[in-house]
Amino acid sequence: MPDIIQLLPDSVANQIAAGEVVQRPASAVKELVENAIDAGADKIQLILKDAGKALIQVIDNGCGMSLTDARMSFERHATSKIRKADDLFAIRTMGFRGEALASIAAIAHVELKTRRHEDELGTCIQIEGSEVLSQQACSANTGTSISVKNLFYNTPARRNFLKSDPVEMRHIIDEFQRIVLANPNVFFTMHHNGQEVYHLPATALKQRIVHLFGNSYNQRLVPVEEDTSIIKLHGYVGKPEFARKTRGEQFFFVNNRFIKDAYLNHAVLTAFEELLPDESYPLYVLFIDIDPAKIDINVHPTKTEIKYQDEKSIYAIIRSAVKRSLGKYNITPTLDFDQENSIGHLITEKPMEQIVQPTISFNPDFNPFAKEIPKAERGTSYSQGTSDYQRTPIPQNWDTLYEISKRESPGQQQMHEEITIPVQEQEVSKSSERQLFQIHNRYILSQIKSGFMLISQQAAHERILYERFLQQLDNHSGTSQQSLFPQSVTLNSSDFELLKELLPDIRALGFDIREFGKNTVVVEGIPADLNNVAEHALLEHLLEGFKNNLAILKLDKRDNLARSLARNGAIKAGTRLSLEEMNLLIDQLFACQMPNIALNGKPVISTFTMNELAERFEK
Ligand code: ADP
Ligand code: MG
């Protein structure tokens, strides 16, 4: 019998490879536009017919190709982007496999026109099913124009598998959006069946987002910025109140390459968690810059997956950076975070008014709790014995709310950071000057210069305790209040297992717990912050809350514990508060990182301005 193994002809090999690289018109669009980016173009036109099934044309003003390179570019594994294996660890271009053009040329009618700046004449090549039909010199603009007609003409199975034009168009737009977000400095247009679909002039990232998704996004974006030795992070997240019910406007880029990564996505979502209503998805457009040696983008041909070392640190950095940005936004909700030279101003719907943001200076090192607070001011029924009170680091800017009258000399002021705080919070007066009323034992009313604000006492205290417990979990600093009559608690066995798992953290919060036989523990002390709570049920409620959260919110363990305990331990609506208690509550609330966000995502504070009152009574 003769030998039967043969090498496949190139055209067949290419056709097989094409199946991996080009699944649908959108994949061809992605490859061609990325090639234009890699060629250094700053103007890229995409022209489509019938959702790319009839025509995909990409015209760029990039570097172009020489006569030989133009021909070479259609060979498999032909690439100018890497030369040796080592280069794989330093990839900064979008392409590097040298597969795309060969694959596309195997399954379509392709025409390439290209000219380098230094050449007088360009090159024109026609290829069908990997077969070069013609190659000749021609006149051409600097750059490259490549048109791909009749995609999958020779692979009917795949052609039949394509979806309707609107569906394929959707896929193309998805790919297009990713590329244009990653390259705001490039001018893009997209035409479909003769109509202009996108016209995106070169601009800064924020404006690119606005152009892509609509003018209203101008008010929705919060900048994120973090610079660490492991990664650099920058971009925007959407304000929580604009989160969508559908996933979608979520973009991660690693070294400018769009990636899908459930783990990093989770990092962003947990930073949002308590701010979002259930089942809603916030916008984010985040860029991670990382040493290419630390990642492997070679894991999948379509390259939306990446493997990296040090995943955990990256997760933590992203989560805390997003959290901090959201916190800042929460404290300064009236700010427009317009940092980039913006043409957004020109397209806002409202006529421009001169809006002057109040700016004040503050001393970032000032800490009102640096010295012991006199007992008289802190002694309240819900916080007596809160010995860790002074240890909790206090965010610095809240105190400026009370310090405005005591400005330092102008010389000193210049050394301090300038920050802007919305009017209502600047006006909250010092505790000794505050006018407070409790309404229906639920809300605290406090007069402020521009009107008044209402604070939900329960939501406020939950927020305060939650942040304090998180801190204690991190520092193992929870203090315990010993019980006079230690209680034994017997749990069912699954709760008992859960308790054992959580025990180190529960102890860090200030529980003093001893195991005592089968499924039973003795509680000898509870967190000092919670001394008004019925202690016998506290542990069981804590576990119950923890399990509920687990089912609904997918929080991490500590977050969950802190939340459950805060919910259980907070003063409830309906509890009468003394004046000192109200004052303390307000002081502590404004010391929180996110004072205005309740654990259920709703606001803690609501303000009413004199103008609003005037409108009710006088107009
Ligand atoms: P890869 O992008 O992985 O290198 P491709 O098959 O997409 O592989 O392209 C092969 C080569 O053709 C590229 O490395 C590049 O040198 C050249 N090329 C492709 N498209 C363009 C373009 N628009 N402008 C200039 N050169 C291009
Ligand atoms: Mg390529």
Image (cartoon, rainbow, N blue to C red):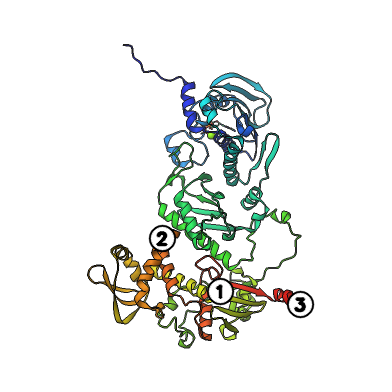
Residue 38 sits in quarter: top right
- Residue furthest bottom as drawn: 376
- Residue furthest left as drawn: 517
Residue 618's label in the rendered image is 3
Camera-nearest residue between 306 and 350: 350
Is 43 positioned to the left or the right of 320 in the image?
right
Kindly report the distance in space between the C-alpha atoms of the residues bearing marks 3 and 1.
34 Å
| Image point (44%, 34%), residue name | 84
N-terminal-most mark, 3 or 2:
2
Quadrant of the image for the C terminus? Answer: bottom right
Quadrant of the image for the N terminus? Answer: top left
- Residue furthest front as drawn: 492
Is the shortest distance between ligand 1 and the CB of mark 3 under 8 Å? no
Kindly report the distance in space between the C-alpha atoms of the residues bearing marks 3 and 2.
51 Å
Is 327 positioned to the left or the right of 480 in the image?
right
Counting from the top left corner in percent of width and height, residue 300 is at 45, 38
Camera-nearest residue between 245 and 398: 245
Residue on which disc 2 sits: 550
Is the shortest distance between ligand 2 and the CB of mark 2 under 8 Å? no
Residue on which disc 1 sits: 398
Kindly report the distance in space between the C-alpha atoms of the residues bearing marks 1 and 2.
33 Å
